[in-house]
Amino acid sequence: MNKIFSKNIIFVILIFFICTLGFFLRYKNYATVPIPGESRDEISFAWLGLSLLETGRPIATSGLDSYSHDWKYINVSDVFHSFANPNPFPIDSFWFDHPPLFSLIPGFYSYTHGVTNFADASISIIRRPMIFLGAFNILLIVIFGALIFNRQIGLIAGLIYATDPLIVISSRLVQAENFLLTIFLLTIIFYYQYRRTQKYFYFWLAISLSGLATLVKLSGISVGLSLLLLTLILESKDKIKKSLAIIFGTGLITLFFPVYGYFYNWKLFLAVFSVNSGRYFRDGLAGFYWLISKTNITRTFLDGWVLLAWFALFFLSTKLLKLKKLWYLIIPVLAYLLVYLIFGSEGYGWYKFPFYPFLFLTLAWVINYFYKKENLFFSLFTLLLAGGVMIDKFFPPEKLQLFMWPFRFGCLFLLTLVLLPSFNLPHFPKKNYSHFMIWLFFIICLLINIWVSLQVTPGAWYQIK
Amino acid sequence: MFKISSGFWVYLLTLLLLIIFGLFLSFRFKHPQISYENLTNSISHFAVLQTNPCFLHIIGGIPFSASPDGNIQANILCPDGQTSPNYLKFSAIPNHTVFSSLKILSTVNNFSIKLNDQNEIESLGNIKNSPKQQWHVYTNNSEILGDLNKNYLKINDVVEFKYE
């Protein structure tokens, strides 16, 4: 009894530590990296929320031709001083680029903190709720991993998600995808709870959330699609009835958006919808290649963790037949991939955000798998790919040149360390050694993550091409 | 057997919340707290007034270009090593006078302009005319000697304010 209690206490302390670490990393330079104005969508979402709360009208800024723009120089967060985009804001009323739900987060936060007009909604204010949301997402990832798999997987995924600089910087952005992934995780958690307990309360809660996901952004349809596919794959009884409940339940809530458009200006709503649905597919048929090989936020920010996680997903798919729980990771990625390929005209960084929690949970599962198998090879790849790509940003080849021989000997030493258990040496503590080395490599990668996250100051960010 | 009613209240509650949100929007639409003009006003209540335009140098430097609304694209040049700027330059688009262009520029960049009775510049930012140096305005390298409010700009005119 005492042992279980102390294990639980340690687990809770670890979760608290991971969330606090993630919060701290996200908080540092949150108002300056990415540079205010790099993504005008951030400002647009805050303005939408603010205008809905104050005037009941959806007013924001858009680049679409369907609107007759009211051009204004609103120098929010000094965007005209600090970032090379001097064009005035096209102010559009009524604004229908996206559904309104997410905008209420930055809008409500700004409103309750004394913001009354658009010029006041500075980046330092509107990004603050995103920092808390980012920490909450870390918590959800740990819960997801611990609930569906085991605590170690939850903690590993949480640690990667909390410290990976790509995620740290992405989490600060006022983009709907950051909230969409919250709803995505919650939905799958509740659906799993329904499957585990057979309580329909969780089933309807998952459907409600999948409906709300479409009101965050239309790509949130992937949440409902995930529920549908999970039901079709995992359910043995009343498959059709449950599928229909998911389709109609999600669809009914989604209807709020067209009703909202009808209430304000139906003709404009249809025109915006038509332009949005006819976007140019810039990435074309190579879209999937760019998705896995290029990581970006508002500018390209190479990250080896994501590519490693895609490799992990390919590996995980080979284990699907033996372990049905893995569907809870595969299906959300596939459903969002489908929507990403169908909707995605070009690979904006934030379009990829909803992949990351599931990819890192997958990666955590694979790291845990190789840990159990006492196999060091995947850890070597983690060190080279995740750690190497990350540290390269602040330790470029010209600096490495000064340490060429130590680097060469280091590589040889590293390979020897990895192969040592395979030499079958007598009395060699293979298990303890492998476990120790896997943890060591993982901790080194995390320390690199933290170090790099702290190095990304506005000056360093500006130099990233 | 699939019991559709069990736990269904959660879903109904979600629908109810959405209806309440819709009703709130409808109410606020009829009774707005703020006008469109005030909401989209370019002046921030939180902005710290910067009187030294040197701080306003745009990173990277932007090539002058026309914007779709005919407004100005401003770039404030601050010569290297100089702590106090004495040079201001922007391109301008038709239907703005030199004065109105400067007003927009000052609003966007939060610096003050003072004019005398003849609509000539008395001070820009915190730099005032002195017996030794005064602000002079040039359009395409020709000095404007008259009222700034009567000089209309043509497309791609370049206006310069020099403290000399």
Image (cartoon, rainbow, N blue to C red):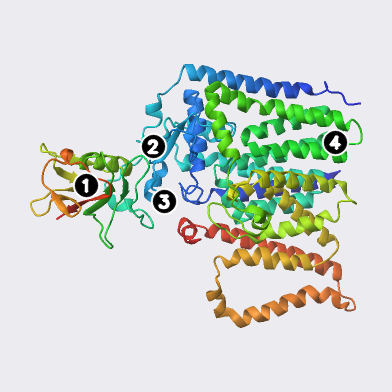
Is A360 left or right of A284, judged from the image as shown?
Answer: right
How far apart in space, not on screen, are marks 3 and 1 (Cα)? 24 Å
In front of the other: B147 or B5: B147
Residue linked to disc 3: A83
Earlier along the polypeptide chain: callout 3 or callout 2? 2
| Mark 2 belongs to chain | A
Residue found 46% across the figure and 17% down from its top: B31
Q: In the image, which is nearer the foreground, mark 4 or mark 3?
A: 3
> Residue B55, position in %: x, y?
32, 52
Numbered tag placed on residue B126 in the rendering: 1
Residue linked to disc 2: A71
Residue found 60% across the figure and 49% down from its top: A281
Residue linked to disc 4: A195
Give the residue type that dot 4 points to: Arg
Give the residue type that dot 2 points to: Trp
Is B147 left or right of A82, judged from the image as shown?
Answer: left
| Mark 1 belongs to chain | B
Earlier along the polypeptide chain: callout 4 or callout 2? 2
Q: Tell which residue pokes out farthest to the left in this image.
A: B131
In front of the other: A436 or A205: A205
Above or below residue A92? Residue B139 is: below
